[in-house]
Amino acid sequence: MTLPPQPADWPPLTGAAATLAPALLDWAARDDRACPRVCLVTGGRATGKSHLLAWLVAGSDSHPATTVHATVPARGHIAQTLSWELGRQLGYGPIDPGRLLERVAADPRPLRIVIPDLHLAGRGTDDPPSAAPQRIVAELLAPLLALPRVRAAVELDRPELLQAVEPLLLALPADAPAQPRPAPEAIEPPEPGAPGPGWRAATAATREGALDLAVGAGTASRLLADPDHLVHGSALAITAALADRRIAAPRGLRATWAAAGPILSSGELSDPERAAVLHSAALATDPRLAEYLRPLAEQHVWTAQWSRADLRTTGLAPAERGLLIIDGAGRLGLYEPTDGTIIARITGNPRQRPTGLAVIGSGQALGVDPDGRIHLFAVPSAGTDEAPGEGALHQALGRHAAAVLTGAAARVTAVASGNGSVAVGDAEGWFRLWPAGHPSFGAQRPHQVPITAIACLGWPEARNGLRLVFTGGADGTVRLWDSETGRSMPGAVERRNALPTALAAAHTAVGPVLAVAWSDRRLHLWRPADGRSTAVPSVRDIDSLALSPEGLLVCGGPQGTGALRIDLAAL
């Protein structure tokens, strides 16, 4: 039996807010239908509203009934940026309000959300609707709070701002009159120019408030045309300014910011990484901006090498003469990994439209169609003694494809190859490994849910031909199996509140490296030998990866394909 949460498990709380703490805790822990799903915390300025919500969040993890899944202070946000941050914390990635509402509606979890400072939301001049808190309520919070599994504690100065259905109202004293939002300090922005000490050396207050002042003065276009300000200025303010179509912006900037803004809005990136993100997005939309940003971007551990928004992919894999890619129309092509140009178009069956790829040598590749069936097809090669379709590996894959077709084997969900081995994952959490020159290791089940991504890495020169298989599952874990023990590691390599969508592994100068793409637009690069990792934000959704020994990481998905140059020694 689980005991109810106790106020003693929370940090000490003093002042007027302490008198309301038991009622807030009781509300947070209840899930019965009689309990309001929305709690409004109101009161005058400096009466402890924010302190009370911070107290709830600080102790929420001490009991499963009070876990808070997302906390986003609304000050300075518009609906779009608030949605990005909510999506990030809920494990969906930074997504716009419409997609956020869809994801929350499909989420089986009972979600608890805390929104401080709703009355201070909005950004921009007084007349655009985006500048008012009411716009966030109408576009995002009201439909979000109407979803049955969502419960929220919201801070505001007056309950009329959020017309929730029968909320629990916790009111602190209102004797301290509400104060107008303080005006930003006077700022003299640096002159636009080449990358230098100007915006980089500016104070945090200057960076945060400059565009807000420029919007009020009607000079926002000047700052939006300054690439140095795009790197160092407030991402929330830039997003709000670009949302106002009356404000002129350089050609291509809105498209660039649509890709980069959701990442930059997290506020967790260094200046070189902000430049790297902007540079990555601008490569496909604004080459002049990308070239301007390149020197600063190259100071970071990763830099985008090329990007093609027109090359939407459903699968890619390293091949003997380049990179094998399936584009969004289901066409197969061989591409140059260093710049994304096409080398050769490959004839295939357009009805198969494979969604995954693995090159298996002997001039052949393995693809998976949307129904989870395996297909073998020829690819250009430098020649081989083995004819396509011959050999024990091809025969084994053919038998497995037949088993899937007849229902004797589960639907295939992921395929990979490496050093002559082929790994196939399925919808029931099993994978099968066929290593070249060795007997099959049989079926392994690292997950109890569908495998969403798979990668394999072999050491042909090692005794018994050591193989590692990495699997990503719909349970949000990445697991490692090795052929030496024949078992998966007892713990997950990584566990997150997101789905691993693609894996790639390679032998490099710093040892084996694993790349993991997640559904929330994050890439993680791991060194399995010592557990070190580096997180890389992505400006696009990724469903396929290819990693070269030199550190070129090619990422493909529905918004296009691009390549990052990774400094592997800095992992």
Image (cartoon, rainbow, N blue to C red):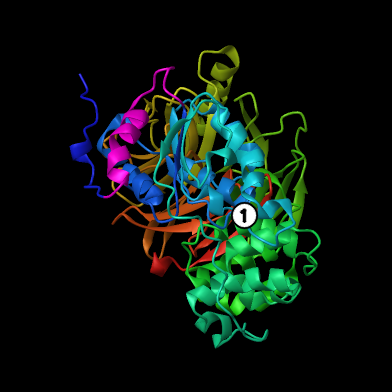
Q: Which quadrant of the figure contains the N terminus? A: top left
Q: State the residue in front, 131 or 301.
A: 131
Note whether 406 is above or below 447 in the view shown: above
Magenta stretch?
Answer: 15-36
Whole-percent x, y for residue 259 in the image: 66, 56
Image side of residue 365 versus residue 520, left or right: right
Q: State the residue in front, 381 or 16.
A: 16
Q: Residues within 10 Å of mark 1 (few under 14, many from 20)?
A: many
Q: Which quadrant of the figure contains the C terminus? A: bottom left
Whole-percent x, y for residue 199 in the image: 57, 81
Looking at this view, name the residue that lies furthest to the front: 175
Note whether 534 is above or below 32 in the view shown: below
Image side of residue 208 versus residue 111, left or right: right
Task: Examine the rendering and report whether any part of residue 49 can be seen.
Answer: yes
Q: State the residue at coordinates (53%, 36%).
A: 415
Is residue 248 inside the magenta stretch? no
Helix, strand or loop at disc 1?
loop
Q: State the residue at coordinates (23%, 46%).
A: 11
Whole-percent x, y for residue 144 in the image: 57, 34
Is residue 18 inside the magenta stretch? yes
Note whether 552 is above or below 16 in the view shown: below
Note whether 486 is above or below 96 in the view shown: above
Whole-percent x, y for residue 411 in the image: 55, 22
Task: Examine the rendering and report whether any part of residue 493 can be seen.
Answer: no
Q: Which residue is mark 1?
A: 122
Q: Dividing the picture into quarters, in which one does residue 394 lie?
A: top right
The amino acid type found where label 1 is placed reads Gly
Q: State the residue at coordinates (65%, 48%).
A: 324
